[in-house]
Amino acid sequence: MSGRVDNPLGFPPVETALAEPNGLLAMGGDLSLERLLEAYRHGIFPWFNPGEPILWWSPDPRMVLVPGEVRVTRSLAKRIRNGGFEVRVDTAFVEVMRACAAPRPGAGGTWISPAMIAAYTRLHAAGYAHAVETWRDGRLVGGLYGVAIGRMFYGESMFSREPDASKVALVHLARQLERWGFGLIDCQMETAHLASLGARTLPRAAFTARVAELVNLPHQPGPWSFTE
């Protein structure tokens, strides 16, 4: 790890990130709009527990989903068609973040602190952070949020209060991003759940090279509305 992040807003080269813990690049700095955007433009994201210094990460390899490669099983396709879900976007950003922050069975505390919620709400107000929401009968039952710069989307967290509710949101997001010409959805760390939906790993060098292309394409500012 290269050390602390201070002013100006620059970060150490991602190649200097630690192998263990995988991807730890730097610590310190703040969660200002400008610093977060600078981080995401280089494929760097913050992740830290409340009470700790801000930690910045660039894992190797990186789990990604190409929007056109989202895998929809027959059962999931049936849930999308007949499950009674309504998918909205950017109508309940803070509620989605709070739901992602809620305690989960078998898990410890959350990293989505009030400071993180405030920081990403600022990103949302500036048109960079977005929430995809799954609703049933007027109740928020699942969703996800993330950050978009250019034609790159960084997924941050997702939640479900009903089976498949977050998967429904992700499929709708992937299909819309494909229509808009987005190249990648960053999934950060490798999980079997994401792999089942078509995500795969990229070496960090390949990931950052692709990010450098995508973040410089025309931006799709928020609030978003999806087309079918």
Image (cartoon, grey):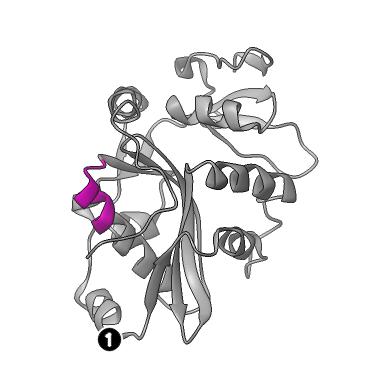
Instruction: Give the image location of residue 26, x and y in percent.
Output: 62, 22
Does the segment drawn in magenta span residue 171? no
Q: Report if residue 97 is visible in the image.
A: yes
Q: Is mark 1 on a helix, strand or loop?
A: helix
Instruction: Give the image location of residue 127, x and y in percent.
Output: 48, 43
Image quarter hosting the C terminus: bottom left
Q: Report if residue 198 is visible in the image.
A: no
**Residue at (67% x, 39% y) in the render:** 48
Residue 96, quarter of the rendered image: bottom right
Please state which of residues 82 and 206 is positioned toward the viewer in this rendering. 82
In the image, which residues are magenta? 175-182
Instruction: Give the image location of residue 46, x and y in percent.
Output: 59, 35
**Residue at (68% x, 17% y) in the render:** 4
Q: In this view, does 228 lie above or below 43?
A: below
Q: Is residue 148 above or below residue 172?
A: above
Q: Residue under label 1, please give it.
A: 82
Other residues around mark 1 within 10 Å, as few (<14) / some (14–19) / many (≥20):
few
